[in-house]
Image (cartoon, rainbow, N blue to C red):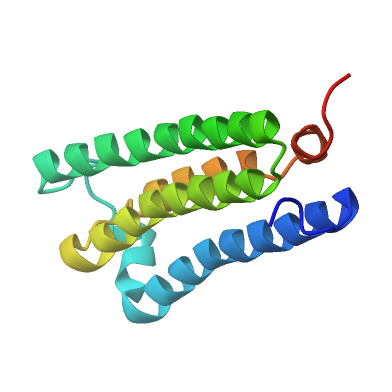
Amino acid sequence: MQNNGQSTAGQQQTMSVLWAALLFSQLLFVVLIFFTKRELFDPRALGPVLGNNAPIIIAFGAVALAVVAASFVLRKQNINKAIETQNVMFVQTGLIIGCALCEASSLLGVMLAFAFNYHYFFLWIGLGVVGMLFHFPRRADIEAANFKKI
């Protein structure tokens, strides 16, 4: 299961499709909230940024920032391992881990919307989306994991 005999372009395409699907799921969170909690989209109902549950909002914000930061660290570790072992599957594993941790930030926003009727839930989803945008699979990482440097 080293490199599966797939070309670099094929591996890039596979990872890009996977990345796009994970990114699209973020949009589905917003659609879900829109159809179930439409009142959260009313700009006239906006209150203070920290709302009524300031400690919970701050804790969720800290956790969201931590998981997005961890996504970059873990992805980089997997890319380094892929280059070291010349196994491109670690690049894909790093992509999935990175996107999943960014999605955790979005899920915290969904939880804030449903459990606390928090109008600024979109900040957590936005953080997850921005994190995922930075995790786009790079061809250079795949090539470095496929070919030993001379």
The image shows residue 118 at horizontal and vertical percentages of 24, 56
Position of 59 with respect to 90 (left or right) is left
Residue 122 appearing in the image: no
The residue under the point 42% across, 38% down is 68
Q: Nearer the viewer, residue 88 or 64?
A: 88
Q: Position of residue 44 (x, y in %)?
A: 32, 59
Reply above or below: 16 against 136.
Answer: below
Task: Classify 141 as above or below 104.
Answer: above
- Report the residue at 56% width, 37% height from top: 78
Residue drawn at (89%, 19%) of the image: 150
Residue 31, percent from left and from top: 48, 73
Quadrant location of the N terminus in the rendered image: bottom right
Residue 2 lies, with reference to residue 147, above or below; the image says below
In this orientation, does residue 37 appear? yes
**In the rendered image, the vertical position of residue 89 relative to residue 25, given as above or below:** above
Q: Nearer the viewer, residue 27 or 52?
A: 27
